């Protein structure tokens, strides 16, 4: 894998998205489009990336990228070559190969980018990624000679009828020798149908200088651009298909794969069984041998080896389950650590809590962690038994092995191995029900006479 710098074109406004957010910050698999592109570049060996962004777009400030990034504003959108040249200060100081790609093609794979940068490492001066377009309308066409060597790229608007019949198109991904890119781009003019500085003109300029221009071919799906919300949904569908395939290839069983939604960073172990309609939001790690039953929604959670969760489990950020934990239906966990072999099987809310190993949390247990101002911690020891329908009013500590009588409202710490009860004592009124019924029957008989 050869190192390179990536230049990511992301200065488009994306007007067709009808959004206040710049287009490339819309998400697929919970990750902004531009971050997908940078991640693919990083995985292909990119050392740093230079991102060309629209002017005054503060929304980019919060963007987190996996490699060193520098942002360059493009004030006037004068074309793709002009966009790349905004990164001149960075390009001048590095001689690594440069791969230029678009920020709105989230499905491009590291393999494809590596092929292009490898072409430069293997002696090409420039390399172009092409694809066979089902419908070439709008794309730049790859003009080749009889031997298949690339001569030029002709933009759709500048192409003759004959050239428009070509279906081999420019994917919009180009690679350059680092010490040549600026000298090629500085020679590009804007004498064309759109009065734009076309990056694609670099091919003809390189050929005229006797330089070697390589060409690689990829699948059209990888270069799918996102311009509309409908295309965003299509990209999401392809992303999800890939994520499901990867989970299955890694040894997980998905009973109805098309109903499971993954995030860009979901980690799924081996022999994991995922039932239908499960959603993984960001930051979920599922260890080996876990069963996730239907309709569970997980975010920011780690589920330990051999645990079983759901159906209808909801894990919010900060949930950590040790091995062999059982979480049943309608249980919400948030910022809580659940020890090995513990059980929370029915209808509970456990938030800001620590639950010790082998503790059993009865049905309907609620940690009252919030008083309207602040959040407080509930600490439950190991081997404890929390009776059903208990309220644990935080901050509160329940010792190892303690028992909580069901229906209790616990607001004071419970010592280890004690029984805590807060409900009123039970009373029996002998024969009360019998007397009540007799009285009611007598009244009924009197009224129907
Ligand atoms: C471009 C290619 C075309 C290729 C197609 C693939 C050129 C001249 N044409 O055409 O050969 O088939 O991509 O999708 O390169 N951008 C900027 N600043 C600019 C202009 C563009 O940042 O001044 C960004 C856009 O936001 C976009 C990308 O560059 O992400 C491509 O620009 P766009 O105008 O969409 O080029 P196309 O006409 O699609
Ligand atoms: Ca485009």
Image (tube, rainbow, N blue to C red):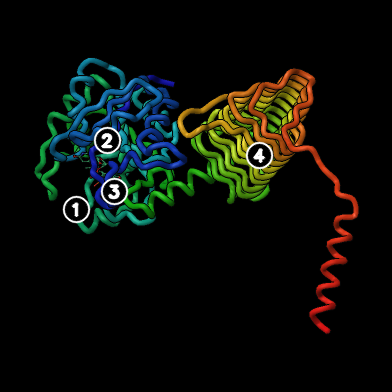
Quote the CA–CA distance across marks 4 and 2: 48 Å
Q: What element carries label 1?
A: helix
Quadrant of the drawing holding the N terminus? top left
Residue at the bottom extreme?
449
Mark 1–mark 3 CB contact (< 8 Å): no
**x and y percent of residue 445 in the render?**
85, 77
Residue at label 2?
9
Q: Which of 393 and 183 is in front in this view?
A: 393
From the top left corner, tell me how far across and down residue 403 is, in percent: 78, 27
Label 3 element class: loop
Q: Where 435 sits versus 214, above or below?
A: below
Q: In the rendered image, which residue does mark 3 sit on?
A: 19
Q: Which of marks 4 and 3 is nearer the N terminus?
A: 3
Q: Label 1, on which residue?
A: 157
Label 1 to label 3: alpha-carbon separation: 28 Å
Q: Tell me: 327 left or right of 45.
A: right
Disc 4 or 1, which lies upstream in sequence?
A: 1
Q: Mark 4 points at which residue?
A: 348
Mark in the foreground, 1 or 3: 3
Q: Can I make out residue 248 in this image?
A: no
* Mark in the foreground, 3 or 2: 3
Secondary structure, mark 2, is strand
Q: Are marks 4 and 2 in contact (CB under 8 Å)?
A: no
Q: Residue 98, can we see it?
A: yes
Horizontally, residue 110 falls left or right of residue 301, namely left
Disc 2 or disc 1, which is closer to the eye?
2
């Amino acid at each position: 894998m050869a190192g390179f710098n990536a230049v990511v074109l992301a200065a488009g406004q994306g007007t067709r998205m009808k959004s206040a957010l710049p287009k490339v910050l819309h998400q697929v698999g919970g990750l902004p489009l531009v971050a997908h592109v940078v991640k693919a570049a990083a995985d292909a060996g990119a050392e740093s990336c230079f991102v060309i962004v629209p002017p005054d777009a503060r929304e980019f400030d919060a963007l987190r990228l996996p490699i060193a990034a520098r942002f360059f504003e493009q004030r006037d959108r004068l074309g793709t070559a002009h966009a790349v040249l905004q990164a001149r200060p960075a390009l001048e100081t590095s001689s690594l190969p440069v791969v230029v790609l678009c920020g709105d093609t989230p499905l491009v794979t590291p393999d494809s980018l590596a092929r292009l940068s490898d072409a430069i490492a293997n002696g090409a001066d420039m390399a172009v990624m092409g694809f066979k377009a089902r419908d070439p309308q709008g794309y730049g066409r790859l003009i080749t000679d009889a031997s298949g060597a690339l001569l030029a790229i002709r933009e759709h608007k500048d192409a003759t009828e004959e050239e428009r019949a070509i279906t081999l198109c420019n994917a919009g991904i180009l690679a350059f020798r680092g010490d040549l890119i600026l000298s090629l781009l500085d020679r590009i003019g804007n004498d064309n149908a759109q009065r734009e500085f076309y990056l694609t003109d670099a091919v003809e300029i390189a050929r005229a200088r006797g330089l070697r221009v390589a060409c690689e071919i990829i699948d059209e799906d990888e270069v799918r651009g996102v311009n509309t919300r409908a295309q965003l949904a299509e990209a999401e569908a392809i992303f999800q298909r890939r994520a499901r395939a990867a989970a299955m290839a890694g040894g997980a069983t998905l009973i109805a794969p098309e109903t499971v939604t993954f995030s860009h960073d979901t980690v799924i172990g081996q022999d994991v069984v995922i039932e239908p309609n499960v959603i993984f939001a960001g930051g979920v790690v599922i260890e080996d041998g876990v069963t996730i039953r239907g309709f569970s929604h997980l975010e920011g959670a780690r589920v330990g080896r051999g645990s079983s969760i759901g159906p209808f489990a909801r894990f919010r950020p900060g949930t950590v389950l040790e091995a062999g934990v059982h979480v049943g239906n309608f249980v919400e966990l948030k910022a809580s650590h659940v020890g090995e072999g513990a059980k929370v099987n029915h209808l509970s809310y456990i938030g800001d809590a620590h639950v010790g190993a082998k503790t059993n949390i009865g049905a309907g247990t609620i940690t009252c962690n919030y008083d309207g101002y602040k959040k407080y911690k509930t600490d439950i020891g190991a081997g404890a038994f929390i009776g059903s329908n208990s309220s644990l009013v935080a901050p509160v500590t329940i010792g190892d092995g303690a028992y909580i009588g069901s229906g209790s409202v616990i607001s004071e710490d419970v010592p280890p191995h004690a029984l805590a009860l807060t409900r009123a004592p039970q009373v029996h009124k002998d024969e009360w029900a019998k007397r009540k019924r007799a009285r009611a029957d007598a009244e009924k008989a009197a009224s129907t006479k």
